[in-house]
Image: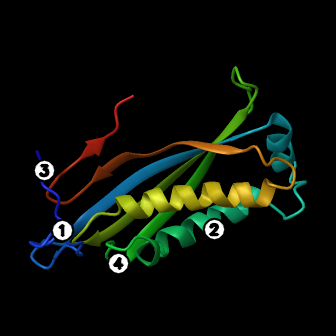
């Protein structure tokens, strides 16, 4: 079992020392799903939401979120991101509870001494929050699900791919 590295000998939180780690290419992909009414998804697709093009703004917000991760998550290392890509998959078919979804996928890359999982998760989450912010005037009942790491590669721990 892996031990927690974010605590010092006194049990207090600390930022992990990565100075001895080799710089390697690292990539992480995360997702978040926004659940919304079919009418809301239609307005997004028709670009009739009053605040503007929802997915274009959410895409930029996701990129900005990845870049600001160390400002939000206390133990994250500031790093130079070499790529942030945000994509959206719209599911127009309502599920059993009558809601549609937009799945956000965020892929973040760097060459460095620590991974970019938190940056990918933050990017997907900020994009989801932006969709909510832009559409809340027509659908306050939106919710989020399946915020998770899909995959990561690089570094000492190697490759991780989420099952299912």
Q: CA distance from mark 4 to mark 2?
A: 19 Å
Q: Position of residue 7 (x, y in %)?
A: 18, 68
Q: Nearer the viewer's eye, disc 3 or disc 4?
A: 3
Q: Earlier in the sequence, mark 3 or mark 4?
A: 3
Q: Residue at x 25, y 68 (%)?
A: 114
Q: Nearer the viewer's eye, disc 3 or disc 2?
A: 3
**Label 3, on which residue?**
2
* Image position of 24 with respect to 49: above or below: below
Q: CA distance from mark 1 to mark 3?
A: 13 Å
**Label 2, on which residue?**
60
Q: Residue at x 37, y 74 (%)?
A: 74
Q: What secondary structure is found at the residue carrying circle 1?
A: loop
**Residue contact between numbered discs 4 and 2, judged by CB atoms under 8 Å:** no
Q: Quadrant of residue 56?
A: bottom right
**Label 4, on which residue?**
79
Q: Earlier in the sequence, mark 1 or mark 2?
A: 1
Q: Position of residue 98 (x, y in %)?
A: 76, 26
Q: CA distance from mark 3 to mark 2?
A: 36 Å
Question: Which mark identifies residue 7?
Answer: 1
Q: Residue at x 37, y 78 (%)?
A: 80
Residue 82 placement, left or right of 103: left
Q: Position of residue 91 (x, y in %)?
A: 68, 33
Q: Position of residue 41 (x, y in %)?
A: 79, 42
Count of numbered circles on the image: 4
Nearer the observer, 136 or 153: 136
Nearer the observer, 132 or 160: 132
């Amino acid at each position: 079992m892996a031990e927690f590295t974010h605590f010092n000998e006194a049990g207090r939180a600390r930022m992990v020392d990565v100075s001895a780690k080799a710089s390697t290419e690292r990539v992480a992909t995360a997702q978040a799903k926004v659940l919304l009414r079919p009418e809301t998804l239609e307005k997004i697709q028709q670009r009739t939401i009053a605040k503007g093009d929802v997915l274009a703004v959410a895409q930029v917000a996701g990129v900005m979120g990845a870049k600001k991760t160390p400002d939000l998550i206390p133990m994250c290392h500031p790093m130079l991101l070499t790529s942030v890509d945000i994509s959206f998959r719209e599911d127009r078919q309502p599920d059993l509870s009558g809601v549609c979804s937009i799945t956000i996928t965020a892929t973040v890359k760097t060459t460095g001494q620590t991974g970019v999982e938190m940056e990918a998760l933050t990017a997907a989450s900020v994009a989801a929050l932006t969709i909510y912010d832009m559409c809340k005037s027509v659908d306050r009942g939106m919710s989020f699900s399946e915020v998770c790491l899909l995959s990561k590669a690089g570094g000492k721990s190697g490759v991780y791919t989420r099952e299912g």
